Amino acid sequence: MSPATPTRPEPVERATPLPRIRLLATGGTIAGAQTGGSRSYQAGAFSIDALIQAVPQLATLARLEVEQVAALGSQDMNEAIWLKLAARAEAALADPDIAAVVITHGTDTMEETGYFLNLTVHSPKPVVLVGAMRPATEISADGPMNLYNAVAVAASPDTRNRGVLVVANDEIHFAREVSKTNTTQVGTFKASHRGLAGLVHAGRLHLYAPPVLRHTTASEFSLAGLPALPRVDIVYAHAGMGRELIDAAVRAGAKGLVIAGVGDGNLNEAALTATAAAARAGVAVVRSSRTGGGVVERNIEVDDDALGFIASDELNPQKARVLLMLGLTRTADPRALQELFFTY
Ligand code: GLU
């Protein structure tokens, strides 16, 4: 992470009247409560109103209005809710009086939802996802400060045109770059190679360079009239991998396959034979990597040109799946799909 020169911290004085911000609630640990012993808990058990009341300082940042879109642990997030969430975010941002959208969300799949919205919400206004690692009833719950910081980030006019952002643990992340990297720690979110969007400490912002890749207002993807997204499955590669799960995905109707490949998106002979057959049958095959870092380049150990494969470039498997689903709404041509992976 080597951020560019930070901008000056935002002055603490806030604009008057305070910006109007629509908060779309979906559940997650930020709205979670412990249920029994000290370790078990239920995500999404609290209403968002209770969360807001627990942070009265929010009233100094913005005029918040709340819409409950879902109430679930984000392991249950799905494509139907993504479509609804994108539509609700766009509807809110189309109101000239609304300055931004904040979305409360579980941390498990926040990176996927965030990247999906980064590609489908066509607005320069801030869209900020926020979650928490500790339930609201836990000692040192991180949700209240994360929510306060997220609203401060959304309320700042300086965060317009930066794509969808994720705020947690005093960090501002680009949804495209961020990944959950730890099962329990509050510092679970890490930025990929392109680095942090900024820092936020007690509502004071320090913003770094904006993204250079296409997002939001420049995105070509449209959800208008789309009833559902095409099926894309992820298959995890490993030593001794067989072809059976790849064949099963194709039989189940997958229009696209993302391989969480070993190393530089590699897969063994059995898996290569199966994916090559899938590609010949018209299934879009993307090679990503299970390593958690690095770029998957074309034609290194796998002949992508000959096999008709797509290299995920910088995207991890779960984000490659999001882009492939959206890409398949526009084209099934592997070359055109490859261009999308270089563009977004
Ligand atoms: N699995 C739950 C979720 O993603 C809890 C994790 C969290 O929110 O931190 O919603």
Image (cartoon, rainbow, N blue to C red):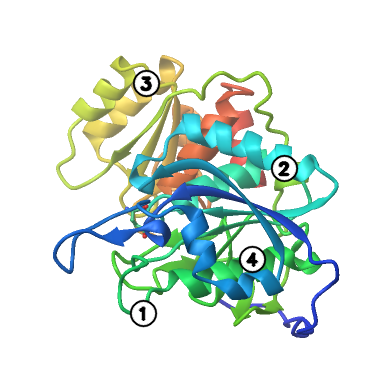
Q: Position of residue 94 (x, y in %)?
A: 79, 40
**Pointer 2: what residue?**
92
Do the residues under discs 1 and 2 have CB atoms within 8 angstroms? no
Q: Is residue 81 above or below residue 138?
A: above
**Pointer 1: what residue?**
140
**Pointer 4: what residue?**
151
Between disc 4 and disc 3, the foreground one is: 4
Q: In the rendered image, which quarter is residue 158 located in?
A: bottom right
Element under disc 2: helix
Q: CA distance from mark 3 to mark 1?
A: 49 Å
Q: Residue at x 70, y 48 (%)?
A: 215
Q: CA distance from mark 2 to mark 3?
A: 41 Å
Q: Residues within 10 Å of mark 2 (few under 14, many from 20)?
A: some
Q: Residues within 10 Å of mark 4 (few under 14, many from 20)?
A: many
Nearer-N-terminus badge (4/2): 2
Q: Position of residue 161 (x, y in %)?
A: 77, 57
Horizontally, is 192 left or right of 122 in the view? left
Identify the amino acid type marked 3: Ala
Q: In the rendered image, which quarter is residue 85 located in?
A: top right
Q: Residue at x 56, y 42 (%)?
A: 116
Identify the amino acid type marked 2: Ala
**Pointer 3: what residue?**
278
Q: Residues within 10 Å of mark 1 (few under 14, many from 20)?
A: few
Q: Is residue 3 visible?
A: yes
